[in-house]
Amino acid sequence: MYGGGTIFENIKGTELENEDPGQLAAFEARIDRGEKIEPRDWMPALYRKQLIRMIEQHAHSEIIGALPEGTWITRAPGFKRKMALMAKVQDEVGHAQLLYSAAETLGKPREQMIDDLINGKSKYSNIFNYPAFTWADSCFISWLVDAGAIVNQLANAKGSYGPYCRALDRICAEESFHLKYGHHCVIYLATGTAIQRAMFQEALDRWWAPMMHFFGPSDNISAHTETLMRWKVKMATNDDMRNQFLDMYVPKIWELGFTIPDPNLRKNETTGRWEYTEPDWDEFKRVINGDGPCNKERLAVRRIAEERGRWVREALQSKQNVYVTPLA
Ligand code: BYC
């Protein structure tokens, strides 16, 4: 269904209507040959728009994603866990910086992206709108949310837009440490006391539905997959990514003796696909559109950070001007 075909052969009446058909064909041929598209290369306006949307959302997800785990730094059990979590959270914020830079190459200024985030105009990953009540919630994020992110990012790092792919390569290298850290934290709970095991089971019960949502709506209702796969921005469909995650991590969760809160979850050995209860897409839509348990709190924290950091940005800006003026 995706990636091939001729959906853009007739561009009349589509968002590609004003593009030059020759340039569009040459662009698509480059993508088919597996070439990377770089910021100064010709690209259809729709490719630029879709990339900005997706990379910007990804950047916001990293910077907001730092919040639920960030609140656990001071409460992490022991000095080593505090140090490791602090480094991880710092990495996530660094990923946001890399991604904002990649999105800026497409022409949208960072200030505007941050404005759109704090004004609720842009989306970010659904999963960070849920509360991390316990230490086990933080362990769930470090292991399984990072695992899901790696599945997505490893695939898309082989995509078509150079700056995004290079950012994803670097991010995946760091995420692989996060994954090991998270897995270690969960094994510690799994092999600990009955209370520790129960604490992780409760976290799993709370986070499983948002985790299934994390990969995006089912292929039959996903709005952007077809276009994004044709242009190799997305290298796998949402359902394929979800399936790959289930393939890799369900056995590991079961191995630790935990129960996944979905009685219909099983692998169909004939199709090689996982079967599961269809995620509640109404809840997903509600949460990504601003009405999740923590949306208001997450954006309020970003708003405060933006206000409190303004003087630093202004000071840096005026210092730059001091250096720039004599050369001008
Ligand atoms: N959450 O047509 P679809 C991390 C929206 S951070 C919210 O399938 P698409 C971490 C979608 O935007 C890394 N919204 O969309 C950080 C669209 O709405 P609009 C997180 C979602 O773009 C700290 C609508 O639903 N990873 O790992 O083709 C600590 C229709 O969907 C979501 C990324 O950001 C969602 N889950 O594909 C720990 C990966 N899913 O824009 C860990 C980058 C869909 O039309 N993003 N929507 O209003 C992607 O790969 C793709 O955007 C998605 C969805 C797979 C998420």
Image (tube, rainbow, N blue to C red):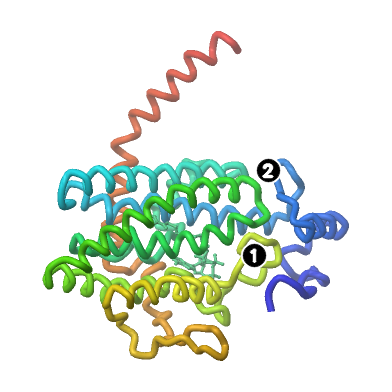
Which percent across, then down, holds residue 287? 36, 70
Q: Is residue 80 left or right of residue 91?
A: left
Look at the numbered disc 1 and say if its residue's Cβ is closer than 8 Å to ligand 1. Answer: yes
Q: Is residue 104 left or right of residue 29?
A: left
- The amino acid pointed to by label 1 is Leu
Other-residue count near label 2 (Cα within 10 Å), few / some / many at <14 / 14–19 / ≥20: some
Q: Residue at x 41, y 71 (%)?
A: 249
Residue 221 position (above or below residue 189)? below
User: Which residue in the protein does label 1 denote?
Assistant: 228
Which percent across, then down, holds residue 218? 52, 79
User: Which residue in the protein does label 2 denote?
Assistant: 39
Residue 114 position (above or below residue 22)? above
Label 1: state its secondary structure.
helix
- In the rendered structure, which disc, 1 or 2, sits on the residue that comes first in sequence? 2
Which percent across, then down, holds residue 284? 40, 74
- The amino acid pointed to by label 2 is Pro
Q: Is residue 176 left or right of residue 206?
A: right
Q: Residue at x 79, y 55 (%)?
A: 30
